[in-house]
Amino acid sequence: MLTKEKIDAYIAFFDDDKQSFYKTADEYIKYNKTVDMFIKDCYNSNIMDTEYMSKLEGYIEKGIDLKSLIETADTYILKAILTFYIRGERFSEGMIANAIDKKIFVTILKKLN
């Protein structure tokens, strides 16, 4: 469950540039245990959007960068973007690392907070 306290803690975590979020070993990405816990908390909360692709399809087709969309997005699009990166890891390893590097998770969490 993503409580306000957990969201605040994840914001502090993802906002820390000194933090080691993941490492690459044998061509695979191993995420920090806090990243793994964040993903688990997202799956166990109402933040994940099962219809995320239909909400983002038009933006993706037009080549709109999802990070730039975050600034003006409503809660539904924010959840869809978050889900896109988390679920995307199943299909393309490194999607979560990419989201961390681009500060997508922390930006979304700040807007949702």
Image (cartoon, rainbow, N blue to C red):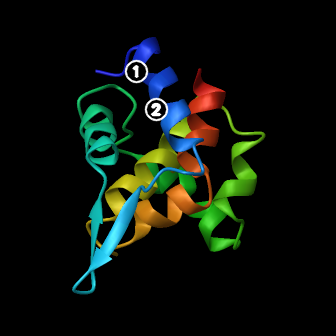
Examine the rendering and report whether any part of residue 99 can be seen: yes
Front-most of residues 50 and 9: 9
Q: Identify the residue position indicated by label 2 in the image.
A: 10
> Can you tell which quarter of the image residue 2 is in?
top left
Front-most of residues 90 and 27: 27
- From the viewer's perspective, is residue 45 above or below residue 65? above
**Disc 1 residue type (three-letter):** Lys
Question: Badges 2 and 1: C-beta atoms under 8 Å apart?
Answer: yes
Residue at position x 34%, y 69% in the image: 23
- From the viewer's perspective, is residue 19 above or below residue 34? below
**Disc 2 residue type (three-letter):** Tyr
Determine whether, in the image, residue 111 is placed left or right of residue 13. right
Residue at position x 26%, y 38% in the image: 37
Front-most of residues 21 and 80: 21
Q: CA distance from mark 2 to mark 1?
A: 6 Å
Is disc 1 placed on a helix, strand or loop? helix
Quarter holding the C terminus is top right
Residue at position x 70%, y 39% in the image: 73
Determine whether, in the image, residue 89 is placed left or right of residue 72. left
| Image location (x, y in percent) of residue 70 | 69, 45
Q: Identify the residue position indicated by label 1 in the image.
A: 6
